[in-house]
Image (spheres, grey):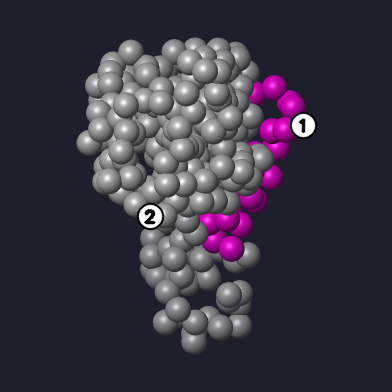
Amino acid sequence: MIALLNQIPSEVKIRKHLRKIIFGSHLFCPHCHSRKVYALENRYRCRKCRKPFSLLSGTWLSSMKISLRTFWALLWCWTQKVPILQTQKLCHLSEEAVRHWFRQFRLHLPDLEPILQGKVQIDEAYFKSLSLVMAKQAGSKKLAHQVIFKNSVNKSEASQFLFQYIQPKSRLQTDGASIYKNINQWWQVKHKVDIHKKFEFGLTSEIEGLFGNLRTFIRRMYHHVTPEYLPEIVAEFSVKFSRPEIFDSPLSYLEKTINPVPFDYRHRKTNSSIIKA
Ligand SMILES: [Zn+2]
């Protein structure tokens, strides 16, 4: 049983939130779209086509086996960066279960498809057997990144990254790494270089600060990450940075990641009096 905390609403309230997100203001049968449905314990049945359905049956949460309050508590912990061990204790779940749910939340985040422009800072970070190339549009929350499955980055990989994520005529700001030497002969950018040996860090300070935040985030929240999950965790970190509003609360996350059950507009005629667009 989850503790009674203000940030975790009652089961009834959570069902209300989910119902509103998934069905809008009026419940309807996801099979035939009839509004003539009735509740049967925690499920529904359609009077017209007789088929049963549940609140979550059309969503990515359809096979959920935990209670709605436990689910909400997990999601609250994840959005608020509560470490895995703390979450286990609050939710009375195993480490495996918490990691499983945090992964589900992460995998259902919206994709960012960024093309960066203007002043763009690029740098690399290394995690044992993996390398990360990340770019940040200076003065903005726009990021692009790519995980490379080996412990170094070569010129061709750096160029590929530019082709995909950096708009031509951008101003590229990097450290003195040799992979960016003469990069403007491969992609149309103006290239500026900081020489770290001379204590120049201004051109890449935003991206380097971000790498520091990424490492802290991984260590505090996940404690450790195996290489197979690192690309997902980096993606989670990027969305957190670029779209912080998604992480305001469980409700804001769900509003942005659960698709409403599609309502077929051909049924509008017969039911028009009770449909809200
Ligand atoms: Zn039906």
Q: Quadrant of the N terminus?
A: top right
Q: What residue lies at 37% left-to-right and 19% top-to-bottom? A: 126
Q: Can the viewer see residue 231?
A: no
Mark before the other along the chain sequence, 2 or 1: 1
Q: Quadrant of the C terminus?
A: bottom right
Query: Which kind of residue does numbered mark 2 sit on?
Result: Pro
Residue 78 found in image quarter: top right
**The one of 118 and 87 positioned closer to us in this rendering:** 118
**The one of 250 and 121 positioned closer to us in this rendering:** 121
Magenta stretch encompasses residue 124: no
Query: Tag 1, which secondary structure?
Result: loop
Q: What residue lies at 25% left-to-right and 33% top-to-bottom? A: 155
Q: Which mark is residue 27?
A: none
Q: Could you tell whether 266 is left or right of 138 in the image?
A: left
Q: Which mark is residue 168?
A: 2
Query: Which kind of residue does numbered mark 1 sit on?
Result: Asn
Residue 91 found in image quarter: top right
Q: What residue lies at 37% left-to-right and 31% top-to-bottom? A: 133
**Residue lying at the far front of the rendered structure:** 198
Range of magenta residues? 1-24
Task: Tell us which disc is closer to us: 2 or 1.
Answer: 2
**x, y percent for residue 147:** 33, 31
**x, y percent for residue 193:** 45, 32
The residue carrying mark 1 is 6
- The 10 Å Cα crowd at callout 1, few under 14, some 14 to 19, many 20 or more, is few
**x, y percent for residue 10:** 69, 37
Q: Could you tell whether 157 is left or right of 250 in the image?
A: left
